[in-house]
Amino acid sequence: EAAGLVFLLAGLLLALSLISYHPFDPSWNAVSSAARPQNLIGRGGSFTADFFLQALGLAAFALPLLAWMMAWKWVRSEVISAPAVRIAGSAMLVASICTAFALGVSWRPWDGAISCGGVLGVLLAEWLTAELNPTGAMLSTALALVLSLYMVSTFSVFTLQKWLAGPLRRLDGMRARWAAWREKRRMAAEARAAEKRAQRE
């Protein structure tokens, strides 16, 4: 539980530093003469926010969410199954979000101070585009995003079956009603044809 609270507070501090990021605060690539940074977490928050936003772009906002997910697990004393898979999935999730922003969004927030995809997204997008062309880059990024969500969450094939059980039952019912309606029409057509033959005879 103590470790969960540490992750909870770390995620909160990171979220506040990212939300209150200001491009003119002192940071790794900006020198400011302001006596006090505008970042809610002070000088440490301005440096932290600048680092993550420059490196990951808007995908940096996924980091507090991942930290809170970890905190929720630990506070409830739940066992984290396959931690290596979860870590790899988290890294893939952040990288795929960076790449998706770099591929599809040309907007540069905070008066052009950062790229939506960050440095990582720009590098991955350029490499994928060079290797797979734009269509292949977008498809591979979408595939990586889906796989990363599967690896990070508790999603499973069994869960998917439960989600689809209701719609599949309704679909089976609709198919059965459609088949019964077609059979009824076929029998009615055969009855009319038999009646016409009887009248001719």
Image: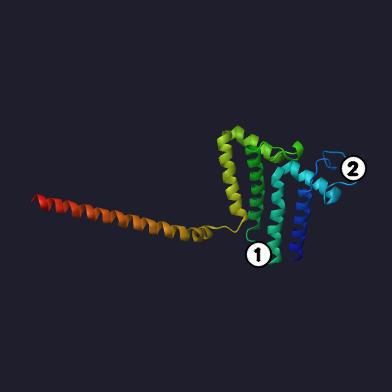
Looking at the rendered structure, which numbered label has been put on residue 79?
1
Q: Position of residue 50 (x, y in %)?
A: 79, 43
Q: Quadrant of residue 100?
A: top right
64 left or right, relative to 92: right
How many numbered dots are placed on residues in this image? 2
Q: Could you say which is closer to the camera, residue 153 or residue 179?
A: 179
Residue placed at 58% from the left, 39% from the top? 138
Q: Could you say which is closer to the camera, residue 54 or residue 199?
A: 199
Q: Could you say which is closer to the camera, residue 131 or residue 103?
A: 103
Q: Which residue is under mark 2?
A: 34
Q: Amino acid at mark 2?
A: Ala
Could you classify mark 2 by the number of other residues whose Cα lies within 10 Å: few (under 14), some (14-19), or many (20 or more)? few
Q: Quadrant of residue 125?
A: top right
Could you classify mark 1 by the number of other residues whose Cα lies within 10 Å: few (under 14), some (14-19), or many (20 or more)? few
Name which of mark 2 and mark 1 comes first in the sequence. Answer: 2
Q: Position of residue 77 (x, y in %)?
A: 69, 67
Tell me the element at label 2: loop
Relative to 133, residue 80 above or below: below
CA separation, marks 2 and 1? 46 Å
Q: Position of residue 149 (x, y in %)?
A: 60, 52
Q: Amino acid at mark 1?
A: Val
* Residue at the left extreme of this rendering: 201
Q: Position of residue 55 (x, y in %)?
A: 74, 42
Q: Could you say which is closer to the camera, residue 143 or residue 81?
A: 143
173 left or right, relative to 162: left
Q: Quadrant of residue 98?
A: top right
Residue placed at 55% from the left, 58% from the top? 156
Looking at the rendered structure, which numbered label has been put on residue 33?
none
Residue placed at 58% from the left, 53% from the top? 150
Residue placed at 59% from the left, 46% from the top? 144
